[in-house]
């Protein structure tokens, strides 16, 4: 609390104290006293008030507060009343009570706001339509519908976050024996503050002669490209966090050493062999979380590593978390 505020409070208390004393002073008797004591003086109302203030200042401020009596010709002009002191103490106590109440309200409000701010902000999920996926030259990719993959369709409760999943939702597959798409695919997003990317992703068509060669290889790289051109990659490894979607087939990558977040299981539509959709979460690198992500690149590296179009990367869904 500033000095000027304390000064204002003390000034107000002194004014109230002065008013309280006036209630106990027989003003007319003092006027008679002054006229008789100073017969040559012409007394006005202001003179009486000034004289009265002087008496109060001299008797009750310069000296210790105690009982005084002003007498002349046997008459009592003034007697200090203990209620004056009580009134002064009461007013001082009220000021401190008011300050304490406001302090309590302020501290309570501040603690509430601090307490509320301690709760984490609920995540915001943004489903990204795979129909926006393009090749490096901005040509549209060939798309397939989810209903041609499985004998049934996952619903909204199949995974912990929302994805665009329906019989008519599209699936994107990079170049392989089953796809004529290129190995580099780009998905425009233009979102700032992305913390995580949720992926429904698997390998596709690992041929029998490639199973051993592909295991342990960084077969897929996911790049986050910011508005300023900055690029942050995350690599995915066959047999570590990527496996084939048709795990019922022979001679494919059927397992992963790092558990995925969740697995949705069904059957391949045509062969009725066991098939899955693996759900994984990728954390955006710390330095990219405040950047505006302009696009996500899916880089199928099978040709670079194996000099073969297989296996491809099949993507069933992408959701961003802010």
Image (spheres, helix red, strand yellow):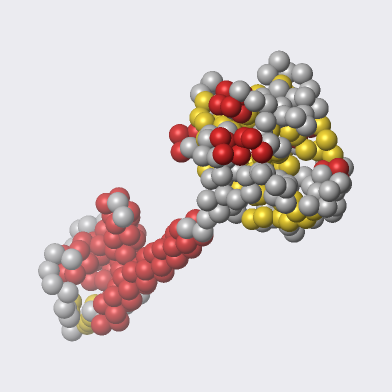
x and y, in percent, of residue 106 in the image: 43, 61
> Please, which residue is most extreme toward the front here?
209
x and y, in percent, of residue 310 in the image: 67, 31
- Is residue 237 found left or right of 76 in the rendered image? right
Camera-nearest residue between 268 and 123: 268
Toward which corner of the image does residue 156 lie, by quadrant? bottom right
> Please, which residue is most extreme toward the left here?
63
Residue at image position (18%, 66%) is 61
x and y, in percent, of residue 112 in the image: 48, 63
Residue 11 visible from this viewpoint = no
Camera-nearest residue between 56 and 238: 238
Residue at image position (13%, 72%) is 64
Toward which corner of the image does residue 129 lie, by quadrant? top right
Camera-nearest residue between 46 and 180: 180
x and y, in percent, of residue 282 in the image: 56, 43
Toward which corner of the image does residue 49 lie, by quadrant? bottom left
Residue at image position (70%, 47%) is 250
Residue 261 visible from this viewpoint = yes
In the picture, which quadrant includes the C terminus? top right
């Amino acid at each position: 609390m500033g000095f000027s505020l304390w000064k204002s409070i003390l000034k107000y208390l002194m004014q109230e104290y002065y008013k309280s004393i006036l209630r106990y002073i027989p003003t007319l008797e003092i006027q008679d006293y002054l006229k008789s004591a100073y017969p040559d003086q012409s007394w006005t109302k202001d003179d009486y008030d000034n004289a009265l203030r002087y008496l109060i200042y001299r008797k009750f401020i310069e000296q210790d507060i105690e009982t005084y009596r002003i007498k002349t010709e046997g008459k009592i002009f003034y007697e200090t009343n203990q209620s004056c002191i009580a009134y002064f103490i009461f007013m001082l106590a009220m000021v401190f009570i008011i300050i304490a109440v406001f302090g309590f309200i302020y501290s309570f409000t501040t603690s509430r706001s601090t307490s509320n701010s301690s709760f984490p902000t609920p995540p915001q999920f943004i489903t990204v339509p795979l129909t926006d996926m393009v090749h490096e030259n901005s040509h549209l990719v060939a798309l397939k519908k989810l209903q041609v993959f499985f004998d049934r369709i996952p619903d909204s409760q199949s995974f912990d976050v929302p994805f665009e999943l329906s019989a008519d939702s599209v699936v994107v597959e990079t170049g392989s024996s089953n796809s004529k798409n290129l190995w580099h695919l780009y998905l425009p997003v233009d979102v700032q503050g992305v913390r995580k990317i949720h992926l429904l992703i698997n390998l596709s068509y690992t041929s029998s002669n490639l199973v051993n060669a592909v295991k342990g290889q960084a077969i897929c790289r996911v790049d986050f490209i910011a508005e300023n051109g900055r690029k942050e990659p995350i690599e995915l490894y066959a047999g570590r966090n990527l496996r084939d979607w048709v795990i019922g087939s022979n001679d494919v990558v059927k397992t992963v050493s790092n558990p995925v977040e969740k697995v949705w299981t069904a059957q391949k539509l045509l062969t009725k062999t066991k098939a899955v959709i693996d759900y994984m979460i990728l954390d955006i690198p710390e330095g990219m979380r405040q950047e505006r992500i302009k696009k996500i690149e899916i880089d199928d590296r099978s040709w670079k590593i194996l000099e073969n179009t297989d296996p491809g990367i099949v993507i069933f869904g992408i959701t961003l978390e802010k």
